Amino acid sequence: MSDPHEFILQHISRHIMLSEPDIQRFKSVLRYRKLRKRQYLLQAGDVSLYENFVLKGCLRAYTVDPDGTEHIVMFAVEGWWVSDLYSFLAGTPATQNIDALEDTEVFSIEKNDLEKLYQQVPEFNRMFRILLQNAFVAQQQRIIGSISQTAEEQYTSFITKYPTLEQRIPQNQVASYLGLTPETLSRIRKQQAKK
């Protein structure tokens, strides 16, 4: 990636138009970070200080229950934003871990810098409102799907919505995201391959 700023600016331009001074102001608050595969972006118990934009790679956000079972809340690939949103907004300890499933590059924006951007460049208020609305709708659809769809329907919805993700993520991770056992997912995949 020659200039990583180009990718995030393209993403933003789908939502808002910025003047050159606003672009420079935005670029000045971005912190470029590289993570190796399996490296944490955030650990449960730490406060989420940043909103993160994925430039390259794949992250997963997940919780771990008392018996050690992981429950994947979301994946984040190129062009997606990720954080433990409640921790980020409330300043409370995170309940989610976020780690890299691949070598990953992100731009991070500290909360205070984001708040200043909202004041100085009101268009960012609009953009992040749109992103939050989209995230809320996606989460609502996922909850409805998990309580009203069969395991087969959930898997079909997943591969329809995220057609390239399954090739990048181990099957046990997809199963965790869908709330299925790896064995159930394997059976579903074999049945669909026969069709």
Image: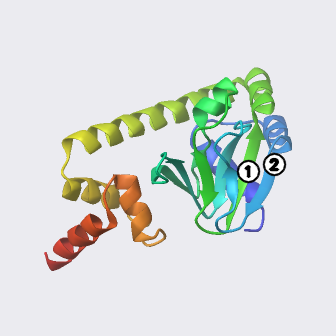
Q: How is the image coloured?
A: rainbow
The answer to whether mark 1 and mark 2 are in CB contact below 8 A is yes
In this image, 183 relative to 173: left or right?
Answer: left
In this image, 142 relative to 92: left or right?
Answer: left
User: Can you name the residue that lies furthest to the left here?
Assistant: 195
Residue 63 image offset from top left, x and y in percent: 52, 46
In this image, 109 relative to 133: left or right?
Answer: right
Asked whether residue 10 appears in the rendered view, the answer is yes
User: Can you name the residue that lies furthest to the front here?
Assistant: 67
Q: Residue at x 75, y 40 (%)?
A: 109
Residue 66 image offset from top left, x and y in percent: 49, 45
Mark 2: give few (<14), some (14-19) or many (20+) Cα within 10 Å.
Answer: few
Q: Which numbered circle lies on residue 87?
A: none
* Screen quadrant of the C terminus: bottom left
Task: Say whether disc 1 or disc 2 marks the residue closer to the N-terminus.
Answer: 2
Q: Secondary structure at mark 1?
A: strand
Label 2 is placed on what type of residue? Arg
Q: Which image quarter: residue 158? A: bottom left
Q: Which residue is mark 2?
A: 31
Q: Which residue is mark 1?
A: 107
Q: Which image quarter: residue 155? A: bottom left
Query: Rounded to the nearest whole Å, what is the CA distance between mark 1 and mark 2?
Result: 5 Å
Q: Between residues 4 and 108, which one lies in front from this camera angle? A: 108
Label 1 is placed on what type of residue? Phe
* Screen quadrant of the N terminus: bottom right
Residue 114 image offset from top left, x and y in percent: 75, 31
Q: Residue at x 33, y 66 (%)?
A: 182
Q: Residue at x 65, y 27 (%)?
A: 89
Q: Is residue 150 above or below residue 191?
A: above
Q: Between residues 15 and 142, which one lies in front from this camera angle? A: 142
Q: Between residues 30 and 39, which one lies in front from this camera angle? A: 39
Asked whether residue 162 appears in the rendered view, the answer is no
